[in-house]
Image (spheres, rainbow, N blue to C red):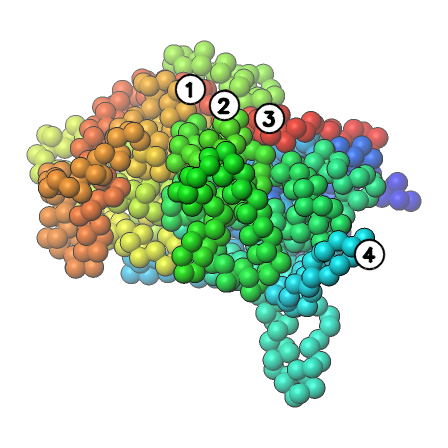
Amino acid sequence: IWNEFSKEESTDEATIQKSFIRHATKTLARSSYNMDQFAAYQATAHSVRDHLIDRWNATQHCHSVKDPKRVYYMSLEFLIGRTLDNALLNLNLKDHYKRAIGGIGFTIEDLVDEEVDAALGNGGLGRLAACFMDSLATLDYPAWGYGIRYEYGIFQQKLVDGYQTEYPDYWLTFGNPWEIQRLDVSYDVRFRGYVEKYVDVSGQTRYRWEGGEKVVAVANDYPIPGFQTKNCINIRLWSSKPKKEFDFASFNEGNYDKSVEEQKAAENITSVLYPNDNHMVGKVLRLKQQYFFVSATLQDIIRRFKKTSRPWSEFPQQVSIQLNDTHPTLSIVELQRILIDEEGLTWDEAWDIVTHTYSYTNHTVLPEALEKWAVPLISDLLPRHMMIIFELNLYFLQRVEKLFPGDRDRLRRMSVIEEGHPQYVRMAHLAAIGSHHVNGVAELHSELVKTTIFADFVEFFGKEKFVNVTNGVTPRRWLHQANPGLSTLISEKLGGTAWLKDLSQLDKIKAFADDVGFQNRFMDIKYKNKIRLAEYVKDVTGVTLSPDALFDVQCKRLHEYKRQHMNIFGVIHRYEKLKSMSKAELEKVVPRVVIFAGKAAPGYYTAKLIIKLITSVANVVNADPQTSEYLKLIFIPNYNVSVAEILIPASDLSQHISTAGTEASGTSNMKFVLNGGLILGTVDGANIEIGEEVGKDNIFFFGALTAEVEDIRHHQMYHNVAMDAKLQGVIKSIQSGRYGDSVIFEPLLGTLRSDYYLLSKDFTPYLEAMERVDAAFKNKSAWAKKCITAAASMGKFSSDRSIQDYAKRIWKITPVPTTEEF
Ligand code: 26V
């Protein structure tokens, strides 16, 4: 009977319909009389989930039998988005379900739209984790993702009077068919308490962490199916629950409220995702989240390791742990603690295991984003960990002193502890010391990692420890799913879908770049995608867009370093220029639609002002009959993965215009080009490598180079450098009150006085690059050729390539396909 039930259900129309109705009636307790669209989505999702579970079980069984080395991807964020469409495509079931669901009277597209995004991440870092899971599954690697099941994902953004307002994203209101709660997989996690020193039976002085309070971590599994493989891996997300034991001491004192409150506090830990991106905030609850996550994950990994009774020395041969930024870095300290305090290993044996297990990815060199935690905070919450951090820092600094005797300043720079009142723990130093590899996420960024924040560490450890793994994106979600038209065209030309598992094959599409028939089909797909976006924009903003205009998109988190304000200043410049043109001049203008989208951190005042400026300018521009044929300006609210799936395939041009040296990689830049759009960008992050692949004629570069930035800043500071004249004009235009009371924008304009992000220096080159774009867009066939050549050059930027890089060079793991016998 077990064998019978664990076989995967067949996928013919009738079986799918039966499964749909079984779930509608038995799982959801609905009848044919009260099946609305949302219930139909739920029934479909449950029926697809059955397939996922079968494959997930087979994969787990296969991996426990073969017991290969596994990789554990630890990330505080997974920005997954929707699952239904993605699962159908990866399982190759989309057409089957289309017909089956159609037969019941629903359309699959409508049902797909009923799903809410799983938005458990801020931006690039979280979405990268999700793309990596898709690639790990597709390439049959034995891998687990570990994270937190936040009850509130990234906030929902609404515009009120043109200002961003935030609403809680309680995404679980109507249940979540994609997660499997595993009440049987749970662990205790301790906080606070004290450290006890004792002498063990062999006369050794040892320590143990006792007392304090405990909460429970419960596993919730999120199956991740690979594309055209039986393999289905797992993201295990922890949620916090109170322990069953109640605080009877408080209760008996008549303090019922207090004991209930403490129970509630336990559940609080995994309640909400911190909505900052590239900015550190030192909140206790965030530190609690990090340790909670680290403790539960390590207990789970160790339990799995212990099943095969290997000696501890084999741990690094069986387990590789990747830290997605420094957020899970306490894991290094926690493993050391478990090995010495609980497993009885010596310090050196333990540290050898730790440093052969971990590797760390750095995602930013911006100083304000580097994590540091106050020593008193850690001492209070995790007293034993604080002891271990001091101890490992001592040994580390002793080694440094040996290699560089008497170099006090070097010791100060390299110490895990930043001296001061209070002292701080520098998490990046801890991560680098405890890992065998440290990687950056694009060539330039990895160089900056070596020459700035870790320069001393390269001298100490040697340069081999510091490597580059350029980011990538999954072509399954970001082309096949988001742009079915283009995916179908490519498959037709390449004779099948194999390219979706080996993106280097896209190269062969270059042969069609000059073919006018192909150009027309390619641009017709783009045109239809623009219509789809225009309908969406009409729906959410009421503004009508012409798909004939050049669609110019900048969608990403709002941040001064990303320079959305340079973009909006450019729009104002364009608008003023249009206003001064004669009718004859106007007729030569390339019509443009400028689209912004993105969230600002709730406490980031300047970023929020940039949104207000964009929406204020949009109100004026979109209502101006004199220019409306030539310029439209849109801010799409609540940018998320699902919005990106509509926006990206519809862009002609996208902007990636960070000050050189500030954007570690960027990943949407890759998605835009893959979907047949061109980049207007600075010589920064992955833009550089995209430029190398597509060729300099197929990307619009401008602006100061990384190597120049520091000198320019210095020069600006000490010489009275006049602001760029055109930028001055823009500021005057804002101050004239044309876009509403200009007083509210003064703090934003004030940032241009010190101009840390070099807007003034880059503004004229930016506008000149825009003119090159306009000129190029006028020649339809030449533009099409650029887009085709660029898209066909994107093979390198598949997250499959990134994952193979990690697997071979850092994790030392090999694929373990789930064969038919499982
Ligand atoms: C994240 C968070 C999350 C909430 C709490 C505070 C905090 C502080 C710092 C950070 C660091 C975020 C770093 C980051 O997101 N980097 C982005 O990583 C992308 C994937 O590698 C990359 O494409 C982007 O260029 C980079 O900005």
SS type, badge 4? loop
Quadrant in which the N terminus appears: top right
Residue position for label 4: 201
Mark 1 vs mark 3, CA separation in Å: 23 Å
Identify the residue shown where x is 57% and y is 63%: 381
Near mark 1 (Cα within 10 A), the count class, few <14, some 14-19 or many ≥20, is some
Residue position for label 3: 809
Location of residue 73 in the rendering, given as x and y in whole percent from the top left corner: 61, 41
Q: Nearer the viewer, mark 2 or mark 3?
A: 3
Location of residue 797 in the rendering, given as x and y in whole percent from the top left corner: 49, 27
Q: Are marks 2 and 1 in contact (CB under 8 Å)?
A: yes
Q: Nearer the viewer, mark 1 or mark 3?
A: 3
The picture quadrant where one finds residue 584 is: top left
Q: Earlier in the sequence, mark 1 or mark 3?
A: 1
Residue position for label 2: 796
Mark 2 vs mark 3, CA separation in Å: 17 Å
Query: Which mark, by number, is residue 693?
Result: 1
Residue 296 appears in the figure: yes
Is 697 left or right of 23, judged from the image as shown? left
Three-letter code for the amino acid on which mark 2 is drawn: Lys
Residue farthest along the front direction in this orientation: 406
Near mark 2 (Cα within 10 A), the count class, few <14, some 14-19 or many ≥20, is many
Three-letter code for the amino acid on which mark 3 is drawn: Arg
Location of residue 150 in the rendering, given as x and y in whole percent from the top left corner: 57, 57
Three-letter code for the amino acid on which mark 4 is drawn: Val
